[in-house]
Image (cartoon, rainbow, N blue to C red):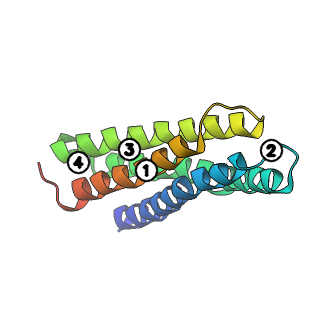
């Protein structure tokens, strides 16, 4: 029964993390369409910082805590090849989170580190990774 509660919590925070990763770049795209000091720039800066502090960062930490707890409660999962692929994809999602935050901080400082077009393309990556993760967990193709 404990395993199911941990699994449910894990899934709740996966959903929150993925929602945040899909919204955060959009805020930054809007921010790039204005200049530092302009109302839109400052509004998107504040909104993205709240999203990062309230949803993204805590969700990422809790996804890992609950995910590792599930592995601790059921270590046989680590002997399954689909789990290795899933963990690789989760590592990539975690790295993407860090990359998005780094880009966001450059944009907040008025830096020209990325174009809106490139950020729009990168915005699709979390969803593609999610598709792979869900397939690994539900279909277990290996």
Left-right relation of 85 to 114:
left
Q: In what element is the residue under mark 2?
A: loop
Instruction: Evaluate if marks 3 and 4 touch, with contact meaning CB atoms under 8 Å apart.
Output: no
Eye-nearest disc, 2 or 1:
2
Question: Does residue 63 appear in the picture of this structure?
Answer: yes
Q: Earlier in the sequence, mark 2 or mark 4?
A: 2
Disc 1 to disc 3, C-alpha distance: 10 Å
Check disc 4 and report its element: helix, strand or loop. Answer: helix
Q: Earlier in the sequence, mark 1 or mark 3?
A: 3
- Horizontally, is 59 left or right of 37 in the view? left
Residue behind mark 3: 90
The 10 Å Cα crowd at callout 2, few under 14, some 14 to 19, many 20 or more, is: some
Q: CA distance from mark 1 to mark 4?
A: 24 Å
Give the CA separation, mark 2 to mark 1: 27 Å
Q: Residues within 10 Å of mark 4 (few under 14, many from 20)?
A: some
For label 1, the crowd category at 10 Å Cα-Cα, with few meaning under 14, some 14 to 19 and many 20 or more, is many
Label 2 sits on residue: 35
- Label 3, secondary structure: give it: helix
Tell me which numbered mark, 3 or 4, is placed earlier along the sequence: 4
* Figure disc tally: 4
The residue that label 4 is drawn on is 77
Tell me where residue 50 sits by quadrant: bottom right
Q: CA distance from mark 2 to mark 4?
A: 49 Å
Nearest the eye: 70 or 133? 133
Residue receiving disc 1:
126
Q: How far from the left and from the top, in percent, is residue 21?
A: 53, 53
Picture layout, residue 96 above or below residue 13: above
User: Who's the residue at 40% across and 55% down the image?
Assistant: 127
Residue at x 62% of width, y 36% of height: 103
| Residue 80 seen by the camera | no
Q: How many angstroms separate mark 2 from mark 3 (CA)?
A: 34 Å
């Amino acid at each position: 029964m404990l395993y199911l509660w941990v699994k449910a919590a894990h899934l709740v925070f996966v959903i929150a993390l993925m929602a945040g990763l899909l919204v955060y770049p959009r805020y930054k795209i809007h921010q790039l369409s204005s200049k530092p000091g302009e109302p839109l720039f400052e509004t998107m800066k504040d909104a993205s910082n709240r999203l990062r502090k309230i949803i993204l960062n805590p969700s990422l930490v809790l996804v890992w805590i609950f995910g590792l707890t599930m592995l601790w409660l059921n270590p046989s999962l680590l002997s399954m090849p689909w789990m290795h692929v899933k963990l690789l994809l989760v590592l990539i999602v975690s790295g993407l989170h860090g990359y998005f935050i780094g880009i966001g901080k450059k944009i907040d400082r008025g830096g020209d580190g990325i174009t809106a077009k490139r950020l729009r393309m990168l915005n699709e990556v979390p969803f593609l990774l999610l598709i792979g993760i869900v397939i690994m967990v539900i279909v277990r193709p290996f």
